[in-house]
Every structure is written in structure tokens, then in C-alpha cells.
Image (cartoon, rainbow, N blue to C red):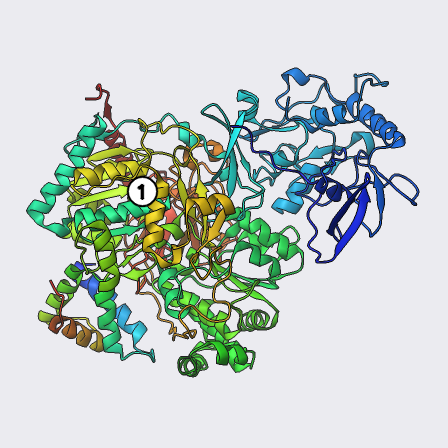
């Protein structure tokens, strides 16, 4: 094994179709017009010495090291800023150039500490490399430069240090922050020799600045100025493996850089087709949970949830699971047990869990956490377009002229894609944001939304109808597209509905609290601004009309002809890393892989033939239905792989009641999560670093996950644990590698027919459908025609949620995520990310706060019809009057104590985004929180006994 | 919310979506949705609720549940 080295071409690639031929050091080379001479040279294998150039940012021309000579031209231009020209004859190495470069390097080195042997970048330092490349042998100015000796390191960031004494002021960090990340947190302060990189705050440290800790600056730094603390502590890695991040649905590729089995750092992989070399604070740095002291490494059992855990061998634990599940089925029937697949686990693991439940348990009581996030996406897009997935690849945004973001906060929840979005916006694309909160995207450096529609929570469907109403009544629809591509009967019926006065911006404006003129303006921009792309998140789906709103988005895209090409489409931004994959793999109770209904006898028969088991033709219980059935006493056993339903699902008291009613709850996870407090068997899981497999991201891209270390739980990947349960249940599984599971998935699933590990190794990744019709995958869906045939307009009548405000609960609560924490926080709370978000807080408008006598930072009680909790208030006009907002990352807060049982009409996706609440001053955590904390502590007791 | 109340709310939500659609007759569409997405226990529970008078069920939903009762596959 060795390090995966990626070529740095010095400057970005040109996209020109025109080709230019020139000669560099006697070699002819042909490159796209607009390519820099530096990059063209690199194409021929000639590396021109450089320090300020790297191909992730535009050429800057400041270091004066990459000079070249061009025949017939005077001077020594910089090769990074000089584009190629036809017939140009370039020399990269002449006596004059050598002299100049040595002189430049002498100046750099005269002000740089020569502690190379003890420097963290020793062996991976471009300054060191360039000193060697230019043949530097002496420094006539001495080595006692003024600026490097007494400068203090900035160690405020949890993950990296800034050592100004080693800075050569090449501005690569500043430019990466601007061009790659789009945060503009860094600047060069001062002039000439006094120039220095600054985080631009009074404290002048990274932590207090606007830095989002994406790592782009660290990646760009050519010296040890910006270094990962893990690298400083451990040393240079000796091999690396390309794998896929296990956080959000962007699915970034990383090089896991290793020393033996110790992870030194995660470095974003330029070849990653979802992230193209960029990263965020979570994927880049927040992997310390893998070795956290609270990680559970041994299986544990207990007879009741009042008892402490007892460590046992794997055999004993698996036997307990199988015997308990068999007992429950014997006494209470085949349907008395079920399971939940994990959107944090691989496709192969998810497939095996649903196979175990359908084939081994003999029922369809299988669901996944997509139930509580994007299940409406599947139903809504399938019934309008014909496929339960987004229509575009991420690269498509480069050709979007108008970007409509609704119910999504990509700078926090999908930060790497958000950086690409912001880049396109800086290039001139127009922006519409529909969100109750003023998210960062509404106004961020060099980006400002043309329209922000701060609608009242719960009115998405009405708002989308009003936009469609405007497009139809003002004659802005793309009639040719609709006539050619859509079902005209359905369209005419829908059009008759949409032009009704109840859907006008004036009517909707009154009920949503948004100016009718802004609604009309947004509609006109979306319909007439060129390529228009929709990106949406859980602010659309997690409503009682979540599915209706997804259909509304599809209606809009069809109406305006924004489908079937680059730059357009309807794009769900998936929450967890493998939400798309877990849905694809047949995790929903009503369908097998590839979204095929379980009642289809012929299709089900193919699985029965392969698995050798009769399968139930009836749909099983969805997660909320499992809770209800448990409380009713007819659902008593649950196998949960990698999900914390107690913290993540709504109406916590209801979930607790359901878990307490079950007789055998099996939790397979990395930590004793909140659900495990009510479990009887704990099976320690494996991290993404400890297994092989695949994740499928929000753009349907199947990415490889590669094992870089032995599972710490005794050597078992999660798919192997599922196999052990299945075998103990009498449903044999004998896979020896996840590639065999993928082969079975491909065999059984038309949209995956062409997928194999061999193809993924060759292509890097592939987007489904991947089959005979599309052997290399499908970046853009619905090209030339919809998957379902004709596009289907569905009537999206606005029906207000039954969750209403009133005198007791006058405010509306909506919940969401922030950048540094991830979902229930099980991983990120066990990393340095707590530096940014140590607790959930309640955002409240100054007007509402003043009415209640609440000051910034005060403890407040948050009550709804479902329950109450206490947390600190943050007063901000980011939320509108009448609306409050919080996150659900911390179990000490348990924001879902407050959320209700209301759910989406089609899918039972909970209505997290609309809860009527009251806020009142409080002295601290509530009685319920104290009791919950005590119970959790009792429940986590572990008797340390020798494994049997 | 009791279990019956919850099921009634859910069934009525489904009914209200299908009521204005063109493609299918609403009662048939509601019945199909219940068959395709509700576990047999939930279907049996809503049928039992209908048998006890069906309080709270909208008209089209009531008819769809009646068809569920008369059709195959109820356990």
C-alpha cells in the first residue's frame, strides 16, 4: 500500500472546446484554449516550480517562482497566469530562470524557520520541495528573518493550527476560503513585508472568526502554516485509501490517510465526483468518534431495562436475539416482530436487514429512517415523474440560471454542495429562497437572494400553488414542453384547479404572511430566468402535506419545462449519507428493491425463488405504526440497526411508551444511544472506516466505502452481524464479501442491473439507473421523456395542518440542523465539533421575546400539546415574529418531546416542522429532563464481567 | 389522540388528497392507497371502527373502508 497521490496541475482546467497546440521544452502539447502554460506543462509531465499556484483555485501570480520564457516575447511571465497560444514555444528551464528562482527562494527561506526535521510538514512541504527543485544552496541574507521567531500559534480551532511563523503569504488559504468554500473568512492584512494572513476578527483567531472549518485552507497550504492537529500529533501518513464520508447525503470522497491502522487525517479526494476535492467540518475533521471512549465494543444483554448491562460473547448475544424473536413469534404470531434498517449503513447492510426481516422473520415489518425525512419524496416524485429520486447530478448546478431553494439549509446541512451553489450564484445565477427562517444563503458574502419568501410554517403547498397560479395566469408556462412531454388530460384538470382564486398570490399571501408581489416576482423569475433548478429538503417533506408539496415542485418543473437537461430539475437534498440507498434497497415495508410493490406476485416470486422462502404479499408496519402496534400489545420485538429512534422520532413520550411495551429491543450501534436505554440486547456496530460497501448519495451516485481498519468490536462489520442473526433465526446467509451482496442486488433490481464492484472500481462511482440501457449510469433523469411515460400533473389542494396555534400555544416551532452537528449528534457530539454547538438553543424573535420577558441566553420552557422541555433562548430576527426554531442534536434537550404525532398523509412522515408551542421563562432544565437524565444514567450501567 | 382517532385522521387526510384528483375515482383511489400502504392490522382496525359507526370518517373514506371490508386480504 502507498499514498494515493493526486496530480496538482497548478491551475484549474479550461472548459473550452477549442484546442491549442504549442511546444514546451521541445515537446508538442495540445490543450483546451484558456489553459495556463503551467497546466499545459504539467500535462506533458513538466512541473514548473511554483508556490502560490494550486489547481483548486484560480491563478494568482504572486510567488514569482513559476516564471518561464516564451520565444519572441520579452521578459519572464508567470506560467500560471499566462494562457497558451497557438504555436507558442515555451522554455521552463533556462539559466536566467534558474537564477531568478534561486533568488526568489533565497528571500522566502531567509524569513522561514529552518526546523524542517521537527516540522509537521516534513516530507510533505512544497516549500521544502521547491528549495530542492531550484537548487537552493545558500541564503545570502541569513536565516534570522524578523517575522518568524516570536509569533504565536493560533490553536483555537479544535482541528488545525495556524502557525504564522511558517506562512509565506502565498494567499492560497485566503483564495481557497473565497473560491472553494465561499465563506471569505480570511484576508491578507497589511502590505509588503508586513503582510499576514488574518481571520479578520478582534481576537484574530480562527475560532472566533467566520471560518466554518471546512479545511479548504489547510488543504491549500503549501507549508506547515495550517496543519491538522492529528498530523502534528501522529506524523506523516504512509498509505491512504479512498472512501466515502458517512455524514450527509452529499457523499464526499476522501482519502483516509493512515499510519498502520491509525487514521492520521481525512483529506478530500479531488477525484470524488460528488465533492471534487472539497469537504466540510464534519467529513474532514469530525471522525474522532470512531475511537471515542464511550464506544461500546462488546455485545451486552439484560433481562429488563431496569437492570445494568452485562457484557457477553457474540454467541450468547446472537443466541439471545434469535431465541427471543422466535419466542415472541411463537406466542404472538409472525407479525409480532420487525426491524429498522439504517441510512447510516451501507447499501449491502441495508439490503441484508430487509432480507432478514422479509425472509427470516417472514413479514414486511421493515422500515428505515427515511420514513421520518424523505419518504414523501419517493411517493411524490414517483407519482408525478416515475422515479423516487432526484433528477440531476450535482454538477448540473453549474448550468443553472435560477436556483430555487425551499425548505433546505444547504450551507448547514449539505455544506459541500452549498459551496458549489454559492459559486454558481457568485457567477450570476439568481436565487429564490422559500423558508420561514432567514437562512445563511439568503444573504452571504457576494450572494443575496433575489426573493426570500419567509412563509408561515405549514403553507408550502399553498405557496407552490400560488407560484404555479402566477405562471399559468400570466402566460409564462412552457406550453410546448407540457404538450410534448406531459399527460394533457391531467394537465388540463390541474390547470383548471390552479387558476382558481384560492391559489392566487393575494389569497396565499394573506395566509402565508408573504407579500403577493414577492410571490409573483419569484414565479416570474423561476419561469422566465433560463435554466431553473429546484433544491429542497426536509422543510418540504416533514409536513402533513409533505407529499403534496413534493408533487407541487414536480408540477412547477414540468409547467416551466425545467426537466430533462442540465441546469434544471427537482433535487431532494438527502439528510443522512445513505438515505437514497436505504430507500433503493427495499427498506420500506411496502416495496422490495428498486421501489417495486410487494404485492406484485411475479416480482415477489423472483425473490422467493432466490431466497427459498415464501414472502408476505401484504405491506408491513411503518415506524410510527410500529410504535402504535407496540402500545396496542401486538408488536413486541424490534431489531434496530444504526438509528436512534428515541431522540430522532417525534413525540418522545409516545416513543418511550412504545419501547417500554416491547419485550425484546435489539440496538446495533456504536454507542449506547437514547434508544438503547430501553433495549434488551446491544450489538456493537462498526464505523464506516471498518467496513467495505457502498453508499448512494442524493444524486443517485453509488460510491465505494473501503475498510481501512479492523472493526474494533471483535472484527465484525454490520453486515456480518446481520448474517449471524439471520443464521441463528434459521434463514442462512453465507456472503463472504459485500461485493457478493451487491451482485445479488444487481441481479434482482432492474435499475441496478449493471452495478458491480468491478464497475465501481473502474468508474470511481456510478449513478443509477445503471443497466443495459445505461451501462455507465444516468447523471440526468427524464431526458427526452419521463420514466413513467407522460409527466403527471396532480392537484395539490392546500389543506391546513390540524396542528393549530391558539391562546395556549400561540407560536409555531420549526426544527432543523446546524453545520457542526449531525442529526441526533451521536457522532458529532463526541468530537471537537461541540466547540461550535455545545447545546440546542431556541431562536425567538425580539418581539416575541420581549412580550415574554425573555432575554438572550435565558432559560425558557418550550411547551406543546405533546410535552415540554427547557433550553436557552437566542434572540434573533432570523425567525419571523410568531415562529421559533431549534435543533434536535442534544439528548439533554430532547426537542422531540415537543413535536407531535401529526404526519404526512401518504407516508406517515412526521410533521416536525409545525408544532404549536408556548415559550415562557424558566429557571433551568425541566423536571422531565432531570428525570430523563437520571433514568439514562441508570440505564447505561455496565457490569464488567469476562466475556463468556 | 387515541389509536382510532389517529387512524381516522390519517384516513381522512388520504381522502382529502384524492377527492380532487382526476385520474381515479376517489373512493377506489383511497381504498387502493389503504391496501398498498397500510399494514393489515391497521386496515382491520379502521374496518372495526367503521363497524362501530365510523365516527369522524369523511364520506368517501367511509365508502373506501366499506370496500376494504368487502374486499380480499383483510386479516
Q: Secondary structure at mark 1?
A: loop
- Rendered-image quadrant of the C terminus of chain A: top left
Towards the viewer: A651 or A584: A584
A596 displayed left or right of A276: left
Q: Where is A97 relative to A448, above or below?
A: above
Q: Where is A931 relative to A913, above or below?
A: above
Towards the viewer: A903 or A489: A489
Q: Residues within 10 Å of mark 1 (few under 14, many from 20)?
A: many
Q: In the image, residue A456 lies at what x, y percent?
A: 44, 63
- Would residue A675 be seen by someone viewing this image from the given angle? yes
Residue lying at 46% horizontally and 33% vertically, measured from the top left: A287
Q: Which residue is mark 1?
A: A644
- Would residue A406 be seen by someone viewing this image from the given angle? no
A562 displayed left or right of A222: left
Q: In the image, residue A147 lies at what x, y percent?
A: 76, 23
Q: In the image, residue A166 lies at what x, y percent?
A: 70, 25
Residue with the most extreme front position: A27
Residue lying at 18% horizontally and 53% vertically, measured from the top left: A363
Amino acid at each position: 500500500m502507498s499514498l494515493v497521490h493526486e496530480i496538482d496541475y497548478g491551475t484549474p482546467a479550461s472548459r473550452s472546446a477549442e484546442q491549442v497546440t504549442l511546444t514546451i521544452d521541445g515537446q508538442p502539447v495540445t490543450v483546451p484554449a484558456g489553459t495556463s502554460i503551467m497546466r499545459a506543462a504539467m500535462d506533458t509531465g513538466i512541473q514548473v516550480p511554483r508556490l502560490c499556484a494550486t489547481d483548486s483555485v484560480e491563478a494568482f501570480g504572486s510567488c514569482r517562482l513559476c516564471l518561464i520564457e516564451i520565444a519572441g516575447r520579452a521578459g519572464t511571465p508567470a506560467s500560471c497566469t499566462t494562457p497558451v497560444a497557438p504555436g507558442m514555444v515555451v522554455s521552463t528551464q533556462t539559466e536566467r530562470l534558474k537564477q531568478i528562482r534561486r533568488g526568489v527562494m533565497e528571500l522566502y527561506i531567509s524569513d522561514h524557520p529552518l526546523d524542517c526535521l521537527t516540522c509537521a510538514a516534513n516530507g510533505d512541504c512544497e516549500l521544502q520541495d521547491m528549495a530542492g527543485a531550484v537548487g537552493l544552496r545558500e541564503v545570502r541574507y541569513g536565516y534570522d528573518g524578523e517575522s518568524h521567531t516570536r509569533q504565536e500559534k493560533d490553536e483555537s480551532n479544535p482541528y488545525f493550527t495556524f502557525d504564522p511563523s511558517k506562512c509565506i503569504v502565498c494567499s492560497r488559504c485566503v483564495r481557497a476560503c473565497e473560491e472553494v468554500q465561499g465563506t471569505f473568512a480570511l484576508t491578507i492584512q497589511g502590505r509588503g513585508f508586513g503582510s499576514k494572513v488574518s481571520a479578520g476578527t478582534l481576537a484574530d483567531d480562527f475560532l472566533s472568526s467566520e471560518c466554518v472549518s471546512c479545511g479548504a485552507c489547510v488543504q491549500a497550504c503549501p507549508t506547515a502554516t495550517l496543519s491538522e492537529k492529528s498530523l502534528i500529533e501522529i506524523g506523516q501518513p504512509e498509505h491512504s485509501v479512498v472512501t466515502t464520508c458517512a455524514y450527509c447525503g452529499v457523499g464526499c470522497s476522501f482519502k483516509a490517510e493512515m499510519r498502520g491502522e491509525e487514521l492520521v487525517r481525512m483529506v478530500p479526494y479531488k477525484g470524488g465526483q460528488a465533492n471534487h476535492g472539497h469537504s466540510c467540518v464534519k467529513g474532514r475533521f469530525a471522525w474522532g468518534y470512531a475511537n471515542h471512549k464511550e464506544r461500546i465494543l462488546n455485545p451486552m444483554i439484560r433481562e429488563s431495562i431496569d437492570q445494568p448491562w452485562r457484557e457477553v460473547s457474540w454467541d450468547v448475544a446472537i443466541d439471545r436475539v434469535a431465541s427471543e424473536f422466535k419466542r415472541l413469534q411463537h406466542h404472538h404470531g409472525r407479525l409480532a416482530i420487525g426491524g429498522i434498517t439504517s441510512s447510516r449503513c451501507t447499501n449491502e447492510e441495508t439490503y441484508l436487514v430487509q432480507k432478514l426481516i422479509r425472509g427470516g422473520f417472514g413479514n414486511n415489518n421493515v422500515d428505515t429512517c427515511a420514513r421520518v425525512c424523505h419518504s414523501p419524496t419517493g411517493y411524490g416524485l414517483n407519482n408525478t415523474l416515475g422515479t423516487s429520486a432526484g433528477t440531476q447530478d450535482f454538477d448540473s448546478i453549474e448550468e443553472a440560471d435560477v436556483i430555487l431553494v425551499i425548505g433546505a439549509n444547504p450551507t448547514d446541512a449539505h455544506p459541500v454542495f452549498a459551496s458549489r451553489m454559492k459559486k454558481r450564484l457568485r457567477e450570476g445565477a439568481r436565487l429564490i429562497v422559500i423558508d420561514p427562517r432567514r437562512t445563511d444563503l439568503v444573504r452571504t458574502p457576494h450572494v443575496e437572494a433575489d426573493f426570500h419568501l419567509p412563509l408561515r410554517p405549514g403553507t408550502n403547498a399553498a405557496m407552490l400553488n400560488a407560484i404555479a397560479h402566477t405562471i399559468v395566469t400570466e402566460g409564462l408556462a412552457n406550453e410546448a414542453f407540457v404538450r410534448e412531454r406531459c399527460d394533457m388530460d391531467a394537465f388540463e384538470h390541474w390547470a383548471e384547479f390552479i387558476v382558481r382564486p384560492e391559489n392566487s398570490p393575494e389569497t396565499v399571501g394573506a395566509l402565508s404572511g408573504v407579500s403577493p408581489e414577492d410571490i409573483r416576482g419569484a414565479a416570474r423569475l423561476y419561469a422566465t430566468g433560463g435554466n431553473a433548478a429546484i433544491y429542497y429538503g426536509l422543510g418540504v417533506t416533514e409536513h402533513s402535506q409533505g407529499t403534496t408539496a413534493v408533487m407541487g415542485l414536480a408540477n412547477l418543473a414540468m409547467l416551466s419545462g425545467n426537466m430533462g437537461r442540465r441546469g434544471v430539475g427537482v433535487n431532494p437534498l438527502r439528510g443522512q449519507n445513505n438515505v437514497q440507498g436505504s430507500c433503493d434497497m427495499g427498506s420500506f415495508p411496502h416495496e422490495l428493491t428498486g421501489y417495486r410493490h410487494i404485492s406484485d406476485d411475479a416480482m415477489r416470486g423472483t425473490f422467493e425463488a432466490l431466497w427459498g422462502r415464501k414472502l408476505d404479499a401484504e405491506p408491513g408496519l411503518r415506524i410510527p405504526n410500529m410504535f402504535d402496534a407496540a402500545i396496542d400489545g401486538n408488536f413486541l420485538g424490534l431489531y434496530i440497526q444504526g438509528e436512534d429512534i428515541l431522540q430522532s422520532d417525534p413525540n418522545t413520550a409516545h416513543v418511550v411508551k412504545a419501547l417500554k411495551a416491547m419485550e425484546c429491543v435489539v440496538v446495533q450501534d456504536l454507542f449506547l444511544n437514547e434508544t438503547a436505554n430501553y433495549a434488551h440486547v446491544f450489538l456493537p456496530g462498526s464505523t464506516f472506516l471498518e467496513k467495505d460497501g457502498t453508499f448512494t448519495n442524493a444524486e443517485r451516485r453509488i460510491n465505494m466505502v473501503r475498510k481501512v481498519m479492523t472493526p474494533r468490536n471483535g472484527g465484525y462489520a454490520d453486515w456480518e452481524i446481520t448474517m449471524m442473526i439471520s443464521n441463528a433465526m434459521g434463514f442462512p446467509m453465507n456472503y463472504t464479501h459485500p461485493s457478493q451482496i451487491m451482485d445479488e442486488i444487481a441481479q434482482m433490481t432492474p435499475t441496478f442491473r449493471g452495478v458491480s464492484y468491478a464497475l465501481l472500481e473502474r468508474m470511481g462511482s456510478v449513478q443509477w439507473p445503471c443497466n443495459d440501457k445505461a451501462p455507465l449510469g444516468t447523471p440526468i433523469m427524464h431526458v427526452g421523456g419521463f420514466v413513467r411515460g407522460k409527466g403527471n400533473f396532480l392537484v395539490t389542494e392546500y389543506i391546513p395542518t390540524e396542528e393549530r396555534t391558539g391562546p395556549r400555544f400561540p407560536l409555531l416551532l420549526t426544527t432543523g440542523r446546524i453545520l457542526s452537528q449531525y442529526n441526533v449528534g451521536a457522532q458529532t457530539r463526541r468530537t471537537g465539533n461541540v466547540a461550535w454547538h455545545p447545546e440546542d438553543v431556541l431562536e425567538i424573535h425580539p418581539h416575541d421575546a420581549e412580550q415574554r420577558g425573555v432575554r438572550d441566553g435565558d432559560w425558557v420552557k418550550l411547551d406543546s400539546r405533546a410535552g415540554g422541555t427547557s433550553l436557552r433562548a437566542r434572540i434573533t430576527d432570523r425567525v419571523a415574529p410568531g415562529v421559533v426554531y431549534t435543533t434536535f442534536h442534544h439528548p439533554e434537550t430532547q426537542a422531540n418531546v415537543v413535536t407531535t404525532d401529526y404526519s404526512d398523509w401518504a407516508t406517515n412522515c412526521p410533521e416536525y416542522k409545525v408544532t404549536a408551542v408556548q415559550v415562557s421563562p424558566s429557571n433551568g432544565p425541566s423536571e422531565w429532563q432531570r428525570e430523563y437524565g437520571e433514568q439514562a444514567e441508570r440505564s447505561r450501567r455496565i457490569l464488567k464481567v469476562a466475556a463468556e | 389522540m387515541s389509536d382510532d382517532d389517529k387512524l381516522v385522521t390519517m384516513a381522512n387526510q388520504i381522502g382529502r388528497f384524492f377527492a380532487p384528483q382526476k385520474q381515479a375515482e376517489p373512493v377506489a383511489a383511497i381504498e387502493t392507497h389503504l391496501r398498498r400502504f397500510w399494514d393489515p392490522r391497521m386496515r382491520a382496525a379502521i374496518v372495526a371502527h367503521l363497524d362501530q359507526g365510523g365516527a369522524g370518517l369523511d364520506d368517501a373514506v367511509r365508502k373506501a373502508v366499506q370496500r376494504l371490508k368487502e374486499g380480499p386480504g383483510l386479516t
